[in-house]
Image (cartoon, coloured by chain):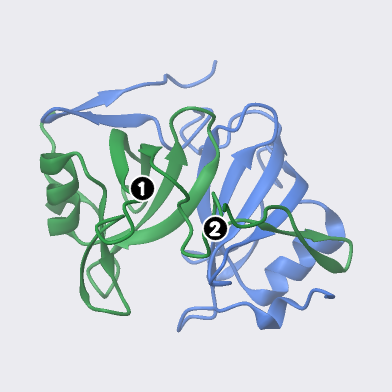
Chain colours: A blue, B green
């Protein structure tokens, strides 16, 4: 079956959530959104390209920071309404300079920081 | 800092996306949604509880199938608009009886099935 991004299920804003996972150790790095065109650009370029909801523009991850994501594998879920991008991440994935955006853990009633920013 | 689910950022439907990751090997199993009350129920019970958008009701994962998710760790992302649930998954996570919902890979121009249903 050949792949056509328009067969994915997008939300009312025309976007699909994308989970980025580190190809080397399986760490979940971040979650962001893609339009159908962003999916195509990601597949064509091998550079993970999201749609920035705040800037309303394409967002080639790492274009300004250098913290690019090289696409290793793109997976579609059973409902075709979520993607998993397995990536090789250069530098930290999070804009806070932490390796992953998921650096806060809820333990008991408290929030605990698991990672500090990379120096 | 104590944890209050109402401090999370929910979408216009009052929901937040949740990534479920296997605690043992880091596999990304599925993505679903929680309301603030579903987050509280998950933390209180230790059983991952989503909000079913199709049924418009709480969805205690595995309640009918037995394929429950025991919560090991709940993490909040930097923007507080996505959660990562690290879980111990009993049986397959996917309703197709596959271990993960992300069983289809886009390779070149084709979709390739990576996993078959568990028997």
Q: Name the residue located 30 percent from the left edge and 55 percent from the top edge.
A: B62
Q: CA distance from mark 2 to mark 1?
A: 25 Å
Point out residue B76 in the picture as x, y percentages from the top left corner: 32, 40
Point out residue B93 in the picture as x, y percentages from the top left corner: 45, 52
* Chain containing mark 1: B
* Chain containing mark 2: B
Numbered circle sitting on residue B89: none
Q: Name the residue located 54 percent from the left edge and 58 percent from the top edge.
A: B101
Point out residue A106 in the picture as x, y percentages from the top left corner: 23, 32
Other residues around mark 1 within 10 Å, as few (<14) / some (14–19) / many (≥20): few
Snapshot quadrant of residue B59: bottom left
Point out residue B30 in the picture as x, y percentages from the top left corner: 47, 54
Other residues around mark 2 within 10 Å, as few (<14) / some (14–19) / many (≥20): many
Picture layout, residue B35 above or below residue B119: below
Q: Which residue is mark 1?
A: B79
Which quadrant of the rendered structure holds the N terminus of chain B? top left
Q: Name the residue located 72 percent from the left edge and 76 percent from the top edge.
A: A5
* Residue at the outermost top position: A119
Picture layout, residue B73 above or below residue B117: above
Q: Nearer the viewer, residue B18 or B29?
A: B29
Helix, strand or loop status at disc 1: loop
Say whether residue A83 is visible.
Answer: yes
Q: Name the residue located 38 percent from the left edge and 60 percent from the top edge.
A: B32
Say whether residue B77 is visible.
Answer: no
Helix, strand or loop status at disc 2: loop
Picture layout, residue B66 above or below residue A4: above
Mark before the other along the chain sequence, 2 or 1: 1
Nearest-to-viewer mark from 2 and 1: 2
Snapshot quadrant of residue A29: top right
Q: Which residue is mark 2?
A: B101
* Residue at the outermost right position: B108
């Amino acid at each position: 079956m050949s792949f056509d991004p328009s067969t994915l299920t997008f939300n009312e804003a025309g976007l699909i959530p994308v989970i980025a996972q580190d190809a080397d150790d399986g760490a979940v790095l971040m979650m962001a959104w893609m339009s159908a065109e962003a999916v195509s650009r990601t597949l064509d370029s091998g550079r993970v390209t999201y749609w920035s909801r705040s800037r309303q523009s394409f967002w080639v991850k790492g274009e300004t920071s250098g913290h690019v994501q090289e696409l290793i594998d793109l997976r579609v879920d059973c409902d075709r309404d979520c993607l998993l991008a397995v990536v090789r991440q250069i530098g930290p994935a999070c804009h806070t300079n932490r390796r992953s955006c998921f650096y806060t853990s809820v333990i008991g009633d408290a929030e605990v920081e698991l990672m500090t920013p990379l120096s």
